[in-house]
Image (cartoon, helix red, strand yellow):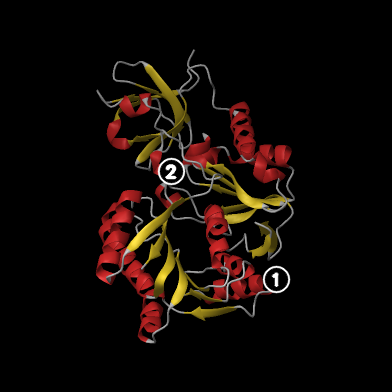
């Protein structure tokens, strides 16, 4: 007996990604839609001969027409399914949940946790829910109920103010979903340090949680060093560096609002005298530092996504090369460069080639000390390599 009212028939020889459990079906792979599925409806996917392959949710306006959830013909996508997946995701973060040193982390990471389009981030007693697809939107009420029941947070807040929802035909919106309205600032801990988060208006869902393990890996190297933190945002890298004993830290960002919160974070951790904050556009500011003859022992480059679309990859690589060239020129011999890209369309291999090109143009030798990536609470499903969006290199530059 069918567990879905509508069926998606694929074109001949287009079933291999589905058989390999890749969770996306693009519009170009579809031969026919049988039935009249509404946005977010559960649909069955079959090969050209009509044989069942998988089951997922339908999005008629997106290029990703179906987001697959199960390859089990007997498994329904219902409230019980959502509960199982939430509990599995929570079990994968058990060590974080038990930690008193870290109280902010990703609880559900969309496709990689078997819940396509669903993001759940935890900030102390509050949860932030972000729904990125029609299917995820259709689950909203059940997800809120289940999160309230299983996690018992103080409140659940929606941050559905991201551009990808436009591609799905969904409105951008924010607001309280359950429980108490979060305060203007929520205090969380990371690696023993405290930070203030604006979960109602801050970047992403409030903070860059995917960089937690990289921050904790890099900052022990900051003791006694002069550190430059470019694209500092609300100052988490910079504050960690100062708390680790950096001799001096310069945090650079173009957002006055972000820097105001960074200053609060520095005061909260009693390191405000060790950090100087500078407002300015990164490329111009780095050139000014170079012209002034400034040098540093450790430079952190954590820029925003440079490539939103494939057509922007070429310009993005130029931007990454320029920023890394400047970063290397500001390093003292033997200094460390921690450089990142969060552009999913820029592969780790391409990013390494870009940093190589920057080293050649800078006339500096650079050794890779470590490869860096998103934290374990942002897992990458092996059948979904697109989930590996954050990549980084820690390089010693001579």
Badge 2 or badge 1: first in the primary sequence: 1
Above-or-below relation of 261 to 173: below
* Picture quarter with the C terminus: bottom left
> x, y (%) of residue 124?
70, 53
Q: CA distance from mark 2 to mark 1?
A: 34 Å
Residue at the (45%, 79%) spot, across then down: 280
Residue closest to the eye, 26 or 291? 291
Mark 1 lies on a secondary structure that is: helix
**Near-viewer residue (36 or 89):** 89
Q: Residue beneath label 1, please?
A: 268
Estimate the x, y position of residue 42 in percent, counting from the top left: 48, 29
Give me the residue at 54% from left, 56% from top. 217
Q: Quadrant of residue 50?
A: top left
The residue that disc 2 covers is: 387
Residue 257 percent across, percent down from the top left: 56, 74
Residue placed most toward the observer, 118 or 251: 251
Horizontal relation, residue 116 to residue 315: left or right: right
38 relative to 287 in the view: left or right? right
Around disc 1, counting alpha carbons within 10 Å, would you say few (fewer than 14), some (14 to 19), or many (20 or more)?
some
In the rendered image, is residue 115 in sight?
A: no
State the residue at coordinates (34%, 62%): 366
Q: Quadrant of residue 101?
A: bottom right
Q: Comparing marks 2 and 1, which lies closer to the viewer?
A: 1
Residue 20 x, y percent position in the rendering: 37, 26
Secondary structure type for disc 2: helix
Q: Are marks 2 and 1 in contact (CB under 8 Å)?
A: no
Residue in the picture at 39% in, 75% down = 330
């Amino acid at each position: 007996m069918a567990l879905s009212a509508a069926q998606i028939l694929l074109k001949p020889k287009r079933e291999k990604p589905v058989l390999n459990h890749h969770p996306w079906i693009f519009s170009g792979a579809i031969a026919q839609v049988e039935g009249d599925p509404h946005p977010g409806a559960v649909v069955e996917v079959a090969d050209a001969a009509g044989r069942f392959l998988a089951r997922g949710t339908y999005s008629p306006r997106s290029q990703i027409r179906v987001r697959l959830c199960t390859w089990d013909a007997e498994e329904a996508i219902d409230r019980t399914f959502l509960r199982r997946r939430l509990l599995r995701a929570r079990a994968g973060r058990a060590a974080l949940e038990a930690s008193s040193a870290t109280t902010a982390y990703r609880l559900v990471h969309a496709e990689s946790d078997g819940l396509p389009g669903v993001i759940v981030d935890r900030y102390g007693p509050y949860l932030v829910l972000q729904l990125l697809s029609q299917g995820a939107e259709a689950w909203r009420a059940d997800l809120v109920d289940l999160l309230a029941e299983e996690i018992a947070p103080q409140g659940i807040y929606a941050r559905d103010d991201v551009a990808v929802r436009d591609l799905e035909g969904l409105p951008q919106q924010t607001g309280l979903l359950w429980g108490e309205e979060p305060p203007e600032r929520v205090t969380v801990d990371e690696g023993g340090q405290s930070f203030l988060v604006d979960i109602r208006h801050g970047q992403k869902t409030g903070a860059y949680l995917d960089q937690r393990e990289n921050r904790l890996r890099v900052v022990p190297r900051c003791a006694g060093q002069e550190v430059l933190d470019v694209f500092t945002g609300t100052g988490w890298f910079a504050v960690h560096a100062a708390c680790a004993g950096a001799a001096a830290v310069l945090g650079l960002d173009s957002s006055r609002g972000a820097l105001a919160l960074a200053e609060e974070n520095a005061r909260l951790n009693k390191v405000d005298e060790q950090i100087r904050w500078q407002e300015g556009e990164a490329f111009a500011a780095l050139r000014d530092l170079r012209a002034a003859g400034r040098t540093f022992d450790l430079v952190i480059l954590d820029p925003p996504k440079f490539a939103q679309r494939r057509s922007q990859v070429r310009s993005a690589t130029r931007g990454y090369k320029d920023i890394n060239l400047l970063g290397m020129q500001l390093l003292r011999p033997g200094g460390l460069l921690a450089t990142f890209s969060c552009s999913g369309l820029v592969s780790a291999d391409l990013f390494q080639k870009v940093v190589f090109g920057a080293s050649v143009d800078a006339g500096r030798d650079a050794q890779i000390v470590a490869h860096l990536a998103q934290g374990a609470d942002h897992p990458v499903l092996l059948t979904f390599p697109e989930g590996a969006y954050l990549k980084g290199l820690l390089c010693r530059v001579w």
